[in-house]
Every structure is written in structure tokens, then in C-alpha cells.
Image (cartoon, grey):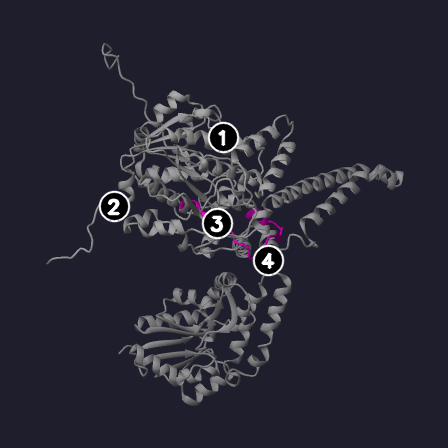
Amino acid sequence: MNSAAFFRIEGALTKKPTWAAAAWIAANAQGVGERMARMGNVALAAPFALSGELRSGDTATRLVWSGLRGMSEDRVTVLAREYYDEYLKESVTELGEELVDQARVRKQRLVLISDNVDLVVEPLAERLGADDLICNRLEFRNQKATGRLLDPVVGATVAGQWIRQFARECQVDLDASSAYGASAADSLLLSSIGRPCAVNPNRQLRRIASAHDWPVVQGS
Amino acid sequence: MKIDIPYPLTSRHIHLPKSIPDTFSGRHLLVTGTTGFLGKVWLAMVLDRLPEVERITLLARGKKGLSPRDRFEEDYRSSPVFRPLRERLGMRLHDLMARKVRVIEASLDQPWCGLGEDRARRLAKDVDVVVHFAGLTDFEPDPTHAIEANIDGSSYIADLAACTPQRRLVHVSTTYVAGAVSGEIEETITPGVSPHGVAFDPAEELASLKAALHGTDTKKQRTSIAMQRARDLGWPNIYTYTKGLAEHLIESRNDVRTTTVRPAIVECARSYPFIGWNEGINTAGPIVWLLSTSFQRFPSKAKNHFDVVPVDTVARAMILVVARALCDRAKSVYHVASSHANPFFFGRAVELTGLAYRTRYAQSDRAYERHVLRRLDATTVNADAPQVFGHRRLRHFVRTARDVLRNMDIADALPPRMYTRVGDQLEETRRSLSNKCRQTERKLSQVDEMLRQYRPFIHDYDYVFRTDHLQQANQELTEADRRNFAFDVESIDWLDYWMNVEVPGLETWSIPLLRGEKVPRDEPLAKPPRVFTPLASTPMGA
């Protein structure tokens, strides 16, 4: 059995939230009118995001990407890569890089988890040399985005049930594995793994970490 | 073990297709138009991939004081097309060219290509196939030149092909001879039936066109006459009209076995001679250049097919067709197009061009490109609807501004004392602004003219050119031949091609020409050493 290191990209590795990618792509649509309309659509997700990740479930994630409905696959692909090159690549924290390096030294299977879409986070997974990437995929029909995410949708939370299934399929020993998260939504992931770790946690996760005696690392 | 054969097999039943190198082995090809974009890539590919060819005779003209042979030598020594051959063979390329390629000065607008009947017949006697690339591809050239290059040239070449032992002619035309129609275009030709479906006599049409042009003084008059005749028969411009007439005339002949190859819009190479290669100003160059500027409202129909084919894909297809012609198994017409097997559309091309420039401008040193042009996105618009920022309205605005500036009397408008103080400066500014307006108006009128000429193909008609014949030929290829010679249009990933091949290729090889700049040339291969035979009586050291 191997051990694995599960990293939630948003928070544990970078400080860029998922909605930022969707909003940026929407803001670079073809034509000014289209940009405004799409930005408005993305903004609809704000109340759900603000109501808290645990309460809103996948709704905010689904809603934020619906703003790209009708956008061409070419444009989404090119802009997603541009977003990665301009923003995401540089936003990986030193602490995040160090934790990834440590996992590699421990010869752990590197698993990245994100509620962002594959077009945005795949280059990051490649750069970090990840073994697995669990993320969302946009649905395209006739080379246009439908605005829907393909099932299963990865939301802010990752269920323990899913982690156990993954461990069974990939023969991963969860007790010997590590998990790194940054927000309360990651608590389900952290609680399923033998070696949980809160990275720059928000207030809720810090409280949970302290209650469960999970290690907390803070850094830039 | 005994195998029951259901019927007696004869040589007619068994047809084992030869490999393409075997088909070309020991053959003598006579080729025209190898100074053009497509012809040159095809020639380089044949020399590179088919060493089995016995001999290639090129019919060419001299240029800029160079004989055809010197012109060809200049080409293979320094043209990027021959880069793979130069890199592989170095100085041995001279030997290859001397051994395989013979260049003959010829004028395709003259009977017997200007060679004289006897010489032409002698030349033709051991030729296996004639491949005719030469032609004039401008959309609205002087009709006299178009007739000479596209119609007379083809007829004289067909005369030459008729003198070869097997009478094989592979004639390169264009898919757009389909004319003013929309929809699926089959790989057929019915001599004497125009695109509008009207019966006509091609020879009579050519004679009466020549008669109508005779005695005209200006290009404008000739163009107007030819355009009218073209439209009456269903061809949208002089290029397609003359190419169409040439096809009808050749197809009506029964002294040659013609295979017509109709490429669509030939663009940058995917891999041969190298990624992005293009030469001169082809169809997509001006469109891409226009979209790289602040001109963002492109009058075309987003859903119309944009039938682009990379030049090396066309060259591969041409080799495949010539091989079939050499085996006497060629169909009479082959389309080399993408709209049937792997369609690409104007809307997508316009968007991808915008995205390609967005990526380029992100790294630009100029603030205007980095912050303004990068954020502008081209879109397709209806050519008939008035546009607030359309080029016509802009042109009208610029012309009005120029008139106002030209007629402005600063001396009259200013008090005399102020005029004495700043008059000269203001007069200078007025002149400079007026000149700028004139230049802008000229550029906008060029854009207007270009869009007018392109309109039938980007707006009025939507073609899907069927490519069944090439796809059928593909299926009969061996695995090895498929790698080198299959018609591979289906494998084009348009996003990758347009962003990473076409736009960078045009930016390097075509768009500088539109901006009046030069394109890069390769370091020329050293000239072949001249060999002197010393006289027997002269000692070597003397």
C-alpha cells in the first residue's frame, strides 16, 4: 500500500479562489456587451459563496461557471491557459511548494483537489508533478460551453466516502497519508486522513483543527 | 491445406497497389509553376521524400536578369522551402539538383510553351506525366494576363502533355471554380455547363471574351467587361472565371488524360518544410493582418466555411494524385479541401485570430498593444448592415476631416497679430493632419477594395467541398506511405493550427510584406565549386 498527500489547491497551495478564474474568463469575453452580461452572471454566485461553503454546497461552484454559457471552447481554453500563466502560476505560495516537496521526499502519491476546472488547474498539476488531479470539467457542446459542470461536481467539500473509494481503487493507505486544507469546507477531507494538516486556515478551520489537535502551519 | 478459390483470378482481379516510391521510381516528371508557393513546396517534398524519381524537368521563366536555371539555383540555395534538403545534404544538394532537375526556359503564354514544336515534341517523348501548377492567383488581375496565364497556358501545356507517350496531365485549379453557388460541391466537372447551370461553349466563350477585350485601352475597362461575362456565367471574379474556363477547355479535349486537382485556400505549412512556412501574400494574410489592427468588425458570415488547407497537406495530396495518375487510376477531379472532412468556420477563424494576437500583444513592448489592442476582440458582422464604427463610415469621416482641414483658412480665422505669432506653426500642423487623413483614407479604401474582392468567399456563398476521392485514395495506401503522403486534413486541430502555426507563420512570412517590410532569408548554401579541366599539355603547377 502506498501513502498519498492530498492537497486542496485553493488555500493550501494558492490564495486564488475558484471564482476569480471564472470571473476573469467572463471579463474577457468577445465584445464589451458580452463581457458585462457574463460578469453579471458570475456575480450571481456571490451570495451563495458568502453564505459559507458548508451551507451552499456545490451551488456556488455550479453558478459561478454558468456565466460562461455560450462561450466558445477555443476562447475558454486559451483564456484558462492565460489565467494560469498570468495569475495562478505565480500565486503558488512558498509554503505550498515546500509542503509539496516534502511529500515528494516522503515518496507520497501527490493528489491535487480543486473545485476549479481542468483547463485552469491542469497546467499547475503538470508543473507540480502531481499524480492525480481531482477537479471539475466544463461541458462543451458543438464547441460551445453549456455553462454546466460535468458530473461528479467537485464542490468546496470533498466527502470522506469519496476519499475511501479513491484509496481502495488506488491502493492508498489513508492512515499513512497526509491531507492539507485551508478552509472549514476541507474539514471532511482532513478528518478522513491519518495525517491532517491545516495550512493558513481560516477562523473556522483553525477552531476545528484546535479541537481535533490537528497541526496548523502558517506561512507565506 | 487446400484453399478453395471461388473463381479464377486473373490480373484484372488482382490489383496490388504499388507503394508511392515504387510508383515514382524511374519516372520523368515535367512540371510548371515551381516558383510559386505550392509548386515549390511540392517540388522540395518530391526531391526529399522520393529519391526514386528519375528526372524532373521544370518549365520556368527567368526573372530580374537571372536565367531560369540561375533563378532555380538561387531558390534552392537560399529559399526556406529547401531548408530540409540543405540541412540533410549540405553541398551534396548541388549534385542532387544537377542529377535530377533540368530547368528549361519556357513561356507558357506561347504555343508549344515557346519551345517550338520540334523541341517540345522531343522534350515530351519520355515524359511520364505533366504536372501543371502555373497560374495567376490574383482575384482581379488584368483579364488579358489572366487569360494568358490561366487559359492559354493550360491549353499549351495540354498540347505538350498530348505529345507524351501516356498523355497524362495533372492540372492544378481551384475549388472556387464552383462559382456563385452554395452548398455541397461534388468532385465533378461537366464541360460546357456553367456554375449557373447554363450551357455554353467554352471555346466560343474564350474567343468572344478575347474579341471583347481587344481594342480596350485601360485595365478598368477590361476588368469591367470580364467581370460582367464572369457574373453572367456564374463565376464571382476573373480568377475563378479564367480557371473555370481552363478546366472546361481541357476537359473537352480527348487527346489528353487530365486529372484536375482543386485546392481550396492554401495556407501555412504544418510541418514541411517547417512549421508556419508561407510565401508571398495569400488569401488569409490580408484578413489576419486586418484583424491584428484596430479594425475589429469583420464583414463575413460566422457560420460560413473557411476552407483552409496547409500547403504541405496539399503537397502530400498532390503526390498522392500524381501517383494515381502514373498508375492510370486517377479520378478526373480531386478536391483538396477541409470543409468536408474537418470543417473550419469564419467565426472561429476571426475569434482565434483575436486570441492569437491577444497572446502576442501580452508580451509586446508597446503600451498601446499591451493595454488596448490586446483587449479588443474582432467579431464578424453582417456586411450589409450599417456599422457605427464600420470602415465605410470611418472613411467618410476621415474624408470630411481632410476636406475641412484642406479648406481651412487660418489667416482668415485668426486676428493678424496672432497669425503672425503662431500662424506658421498652425499651418504646418494643418498640413500634417491633412496628410495623415489622406493616408488613412487611402488605407481604408484599400481595406474596402480588399473586402469587396473577398466578399463572395467570406460572405455571399458557403461551400462544402467534398473530398471523397482523396479519402478513398488514402484507404489504399500502405502504412509507410500513409505517414508521408496521406491526405491528412482530418488530423488538424484548428485551435492549435491557427494559434501556433498560421498566425505566427503569417506574421513571419507574409504580413511583413503587407507592411512594406522584408521577410527573412536563409543563409545561402555556398555555390557549387566550378570544375576546370586542365589542358593536357599544361602542368598542374603552372
Spatial CA span between label 4 and label 1: 50 Å
- Which residue, given by chain and number where applicable, does mark 2 sit on? B12
Three-letter residue code for mark 1:
Asp
Q: Are marks 3 and 2 in contact (CB under 8 Å)?
A: no
> Residue B308: which numbered mark, if any?
3
Does mark 1 fall on the same chain as mark 3?
Answer: yes
- Which residue, given by chain and number where applicable, does mark 1 sit on? B152
Please tell me which of labels 4 and 3 falls first in the chain.
3
Spatial CA span between label 3 and label 2: 39 Å
Q: Is residue A41 magenta?
A: no
Q: Does residue B344 lie above or below B430 as drawn?
A: below
Please tell me which of labels 2 and 1 falls first in the chain.
2
Please tell me which of labels 4 and 2 falls first in the chain.
2
Q: Secondary structure at mark 1?
A: helix
Going by the picture, which residue comes out furthest to the bottom? A211
Q: Tell me which chain the residue with mark 2 is part of.
A: B
Residue range (magenta)? B287-312
Nearest the viewer among A104 and B320 is B320
Does mark 1 fall on the same chain as mark 2?
Answer: yes
